[in-house]
Image (cartoon, helix red, strand yellow):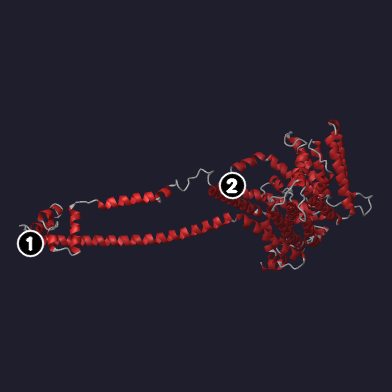
Amino acid sequence: MQFSQMIFVAGFLPLFLLLYFGKKELAWKNTVFFLASCFFLLFQGLLAVAFLCVFTLLTFFMGKALGQAAEEKKKKFFFLSLAGIILPLAFFKYSAALPFLPKVVKGWMPFGISFYSFRFIAYLYDCYQGKEAEQDIFSFTLFAFAFPVLSQGPILRYSEIREEIKNRAFSYEAFSHGLFRFTFGLWKKLALADALGSLSVEVLSLDSLKNASMLQSSSPSFSFLAVFLSGLSYMLQIFLDFSAYTDMAIGIGEICGFTLPENFQAPYSARSIRDFWRRWHISLSMFFRDYVYIPLGGNRVPFPLQVRNLLLIWILTGIWHGSTVNFILWGLYFFVFILLELCCKKLWKRMKKSEGGNFSFVLRCLQHVYTLVVLYFSWILFRFSDFQSLKNILWLHTLPKSLALVDGKTLLILKSNVFLLLVAILFSGNLLSNLEEEWQKLLFRGKSRLARKKRASLGFYGMEDSEEDSPEAEKNSPEARTDSTEVGTDSTKTVVNTPEVAAIDAGEAALKGVPEATVKESVFGASSDRKDLFPEEKYPMLKLSLDGEGDSRFGEPWMETEVQKEEANSFAEEVEAEAKAEEEEAEISQENQEDLLRHEKILRRIQRRTKLNIFFLDHAEQLYFWGKLLAAIAFLLLSFALMAGQSYMPFLYNQF
């Protein structure tokens, strides 16, 4: 039974979760988890259950013995227990190559032995190094039989799950994230990985590569495009397949409250082979680093010994992946490139320091292309265990003259599956991790905003101003209003005795119909007062009307004409100046109106964006979890359709 089968998704998993969350007691949950793991393993056969039981008991009691043994006996116990795990693993790995074994045994391997053997080795080494051995056999058995990591990893260490076995709590956040992770992995396996596997075989028949006479053939039955498309599809498939199982395992673990380690972190985004192995099958790389490479000296030994340690690591990596020779060649292939990168380590550091500008972008692109090319040929070594097929496929990549670049059949297949390839490339990168990182930043900002609002509502530890002491309260108080009224009353009673004010009062009185006698007695009634009000220096043109006497200069007609002309000219100039000023003001006002309209549009856009940001910040948590729940349901429905054979994905692919 696999995670991507209908019996698991529609039968085993819902029943397990229903029983698992039936009670809140941790003992009940652990018991259900253990029984479900045993039931899951029974689908692989009774022998698989028997072998795992034997390995579990051997590891548990040897771990206790290592914890209680004296220092001089620890080493013997450790190597004895190590031999008890490694020898059966090696036997089953290479049973197909042993001629004296019966056919029933040849090639048979207990389910998940490669993964749980390494988990037990890690536990024994930790006990050998002085870490506390587990005394409760049920807790250790739960770790050994944990069905999420049994078939495809990650290689879990007991220290990573020890506390959660004995103490873990339910979390809606972990449940929703785990459900999304499982359904996304299921969809990725069924919709992408399986489809890419079919595509890689469809464009290039593997049986045709076994023909020994292909090298002498004048016209192969396929083109270089078919060879490259098959290799690219397999390269994408192998990552999506492995990472999909890891996603499903981590998702089930999170639903049950366990935190499992990440195993893949966008490995095809790496810019070197060393960086690739920090992202690819992380638990395996960490296992070899912590339990083989570092105990042998790691980077602290001289360079020749370091090369020896690396060679051993990569031979073991190849052996662990498969029993045929091509896997050992695959491991040695990576050893060569990692050794080259170590030799050019100083040059690589200089290239990183020189990053900046266009040169930096070109350099990153070249590093990325180099990594992808090396990985492309590594998966060819990984894929073909038959040496004749391997030789033929490598020869086809040299672009022989007899090989056509493009053929009609492959071109039609490529056009029908271009959407599949684009989606696969998209999900092979770090798209989801970047989205998750941005959502986490948004969640953090939203939580910070809510915390600030809560602090503002509660006040600053009781030191905030009360309403009675606040400045606004003082302004609105009755006393302040009374004082302002009194001040206003005093100000109205103040009398200003100036000629201008007297003239204004007289004009108002005349408008109101005051009698002429009263007006004569006003400021306009006396000429002396009028002279004081309109002095000659300021108003020379009013001199005649004020004095009541004519001036000899103004009595002459030619003088009056010149004065009138001057007045007319000055008046015309003033009118023109006022007209120009009005035109300039109109132009400025029109420009100001356009600027105001533009500013209003920008302001409305900023307001809409601000409101949207505030909405997302205030509801980020709800949007995050509801979005993941809806996405999980969508992925689950698509997966059911794919498993039931009612998928519309080929129709969608063909539209592009």
Closer to the camera, 485 or 436? 485
Q: Which corner quadrant holds the N terminus?
A: bottom right
| Spot occupied by residue 622 in the image (x, y as percentages of width and height) | 62, 57
How crowded pointer 1 is (Cα within 10 Å; few <14, some 14-19, many 20+) is rated as: few
Give the amino acid type for the residue marked by disc 1 in the picture: Trp
Numbered disc 1: secondary structure: helix
| Spot occupied by residue 526 in the image (x, y as percentages of width and height) | 10, 56
On screen, residue 188 versus residue 537, left or right, reads: right
Q: Earlier in the sequence, mark 2 or mark 1?
A: 2
| Quadrant assignment, res 181 | bottom right
Closer to the camera, 315 or 191? 191
Real-space Cα distance between discs 2 and 1? 90 Å
| Quadrant assignment, res 396 | bottom right
| Spot occupied by residue 431 in the image (x, y as percentages of width and height) | 65, 55
| Spot occupied by residue 535 in the image (x, y as percentages of width and height) | 13, 53
On screen, residue 549 versus residue 326, left or right, reads: left
Give the amino acid type for the residue marked by disc 2 in the picture: Ser
Residue 90 shows up from this direction: no
Give the labeled residue for mark 2.
360
How crowded pointer 2 is (Cα within 10 Å; few <14, some 14-19, many 20+) is rated as: some
Identify the mark at residue 558; answer none if there is no mark. 1
